Amino acid sequence: MKFAPSKASLQLALMLAAIPLAPAFAHTGTGVAGGLTSGFLHPLTGPDHLVAMIAVGLWGAQLGKPAIWVLPITFPLVMAIGGLIGLSGMELPLVEFIIAFSGLALGAMVALNVRPPLAISSALVALFAIFHGYAHGRELPEAADATAYAVGFVVATGMLHLVGILIGALITRPAGAGIVRACGAAIGCVGLYFMLAAAGVVG
């Protein structure tokens, strides 16, 4: 894959990735009273969502074309379906646990440089997108402007995918592949922590 980011784009990615992480899950039902701004900030302040979104972009960049675009497009499209399921009131099991597991699984894919066929990688991303979308769909009725909230949330999700893609582009540089895999390992560790938290093992 021939994709070399500019110095400015890398700086933007690092600044966005450095946004402070909130100590709680993104899906607690708090902070959704507003509209566009609340929707935009929600995934940025929820570390379980944030790391999974960055991992999607990282993995796509690591896999190269066409995955670099297919995975980040698949996630928000399928996430919208998950949101509709959440709005319908249908119950899905183990939502927080699977959301946390998505960070662990996607981070592990990047850390281990796993390269499945595009259909399999897309299906895995889509599966996790259902649960991320579902969790936020359940919260949309609480927002003052549900449509604006949804737009803000999707825009922020796309930006997080872009951060992952820009960081993943480091694989074109010397030692870049190791840096990308290390980022995947870090994401996996964050996902593992939230899995344990969802299971009540850690506080």
Image (tube, rainbow, N blue to C red):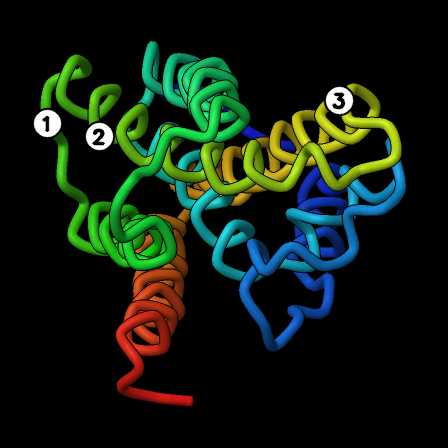
Circle nearer the N terminus (1, 3): 1
Helix, strand or loop at mark 2: helix
Residue at 34% x, 70% y: name it: 198
Q: Quadrant of the N terminus?
A: top left
Classify mark 3: helix, strand or loop: helix
Q: What is the x, y in percent for residue 137?
A: 56, 32
Instruction: Depth check: give the residue in front, 94 or 189.
Output: 94
Q: Quadrant of residue 202?
A: bottom left
Q: Quadrant of residue 203?
A: bottom left
Query: Going 27% across and 86% down the picture, which residue do you hit?
Result: 201
Q: Amino acid at mark 3?
A: Val
Can residue 154 be spotted in the picture?
yes
Q: Looking at this rendering, what residue extends furthest in the front direction?
A: 89
**Secondary element at image label 1:** loop
Tell me if 118 is positioned left or right of 71 in this view.
left
Q: Which residue is mark 2?
A: 124
Q: Residue at x 21, y 21 (%)?
A: 123
Mark 1 vs mark 3, CA separation in Å: 32 Å
What is the CA distance from the residue labelled 3 to the residue labelled 2? Answer: 24 Å
Label placed on residue 131: none
Q: Residue 74, image x and y in percent?
A: 40, 16
Local crowd at mark 2 within 10 Å, few (<14), some, or many (≥20)?
A: some
Q: Is 78 positioned to the left or the right of 150 in the image? A: left
Asked whether disc 1 touches disc 2, contact meaning CB atoms under 8 Å apart, the reply is: yes
Mark 1 residue type = Pro
* Label 3 crowd bin: few (<14), some (14–19), many (20+), radius 10 Å: some
Q: Residues within 10 Å of mark 1 (few under 14, many from 20)?
A: few
Label annotation for residue 116:
1
Query: Disc 1 versus disc 2: distance between alpha carbons?
Result: 10 Å
Q: Height in image: 51 above or below 2?
A: below
